[in-house]
Image (cartoon, helix red, strand yellow):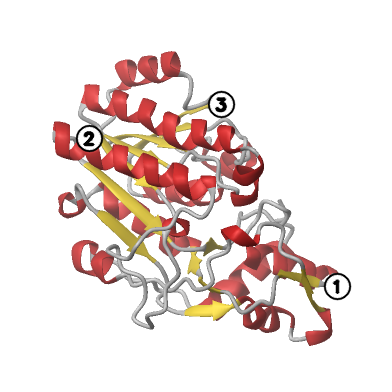
Amino acid sequence: MKILLTGGAGFIGRWVAKHLLSEGHQLWILDDLSNGREENISEFKEHPGFIQFINDSILNETLLEDLFNENHFEICYHLGASINVQDSIDDPRTTFNNDTIGTFYILEQCRKHNTKVIFMSTCMVYDRCNDETGITENHSTKPASPYAGAKVAAENMVLSYYHTYGLPTVVIRPFNTYGPFQKTGGEGGVVAIFINNHLKGIDLNIYGDGTQTRDLLYVEDCAKFVVSAGFSDAVNGEIVNAGLGKDISINNLASLITGNLMKIKHIEHIHPQSEIQKLLCNSGKATSLLDWKPEVTLEEGIARTKTWIQQGGLL
């Protein structure tokens, strides 16, 4: 199939691209490199299915119109977004423009060409979970940051195009994803940052008291989930979660990675109002509709990520 992948030079996008190419599809990647890196997809450049990399923005309507008119995409995986919660608090306009208005521009082109849309949302739209069975798609939302608010607004637009125009769309909400190719600096995920600091002998800094929990999904499992949503009519018009199904406190995660409690430090939270105390995913819907289950344990995923960083995979 002819597929457009926005945000394809990013961390998760890179793995989605790899999976799509391995299945024999023709792939175009659109990414402005505000979060991604062209080096992430350099290994795909000679692949016969890799048609084009476009270094531009989803806010460029003229570009989008030309791309869709020329190529008549059958599927659009829309991962391109501003993804940093703290940045969204400091600069909500940029996040809203990229995540909400940019999604609207994508939807308009997909509507004209009847292109299926897989919209990457986030678990950060959810309210705190106190149920040990985990957060289902029916769990209440609480946009505690402009990032989450922009994603909720975009989700509603995506679903409205399904109900109004019959456009095949699906909203996916992966939980905290980690693994090789994730940045190990300030914009990276907690697992990559902790592993990198541990390997350098640097303290592992935890915001707040560290009792907040996260459900950590290995990136290859996430990519398989993302791709599968594009090829199933069963999820059209639906919201679907994906996670490991187990949560771990940030304190315990740091201990698991470093093994040295003296290297774990607690610091004042920059934006405590955006913190979600407990995130635990219930992926039952993904299992039922997509026959998807995570395969990589947290311990194995951490080991793979550590090996990647040790072999020079620092970003």
Circle 2: residue type:
Tyr
Which residue is pictured at 46% across the width and 61% down the height? Answer: 220
Which one is earlier in the sequence, the residue at label 1 or at label 3? 3
Residue 109 vs residue 13: left or right?
left
* Residue count near mark 2 (Cα–Cα under 10 Å), binned few <14, some 14–19, many ≥20: many
Mark 2 or mark 3: which comes first in sequence? Answer: 3
Looking at numbered disc 1 in the image, what kind of residue is underneath it?
Answer: Gly
Q: Amino acid at mark 3?
A: Asn
Per the image, the residue denoted by label 3 is 55
Question: Is residue 210 or residue 227 the one in the foreground?
Answer: 210
Residue at the image position 67 percent from the left and 70 percent from the top: 306
Q: Residues within 10 Å of mark 1 (few under 14, many from 20)?
A: few
Q: Nearer the viewer, residue 44 or 212?
A: 212
Query: SS of the residue at dot 2?
Result: helix
- Which mark is on residue 161? 2
| Residue at x-position 39% and y-position 47% | 152
- The quarter holding residue 307 reads bottom right
Whether residue 28 appears in this view of the structure is no
- Say which label, 1 or 2, has the lower sequence index: 2
Q: Position of residue 194 (x, y in %)?
A: 71, 69
Q: Is residue 61 left or right of residue 45?
A: left
Q: Tell me: 73 left or right of 60.
A: left
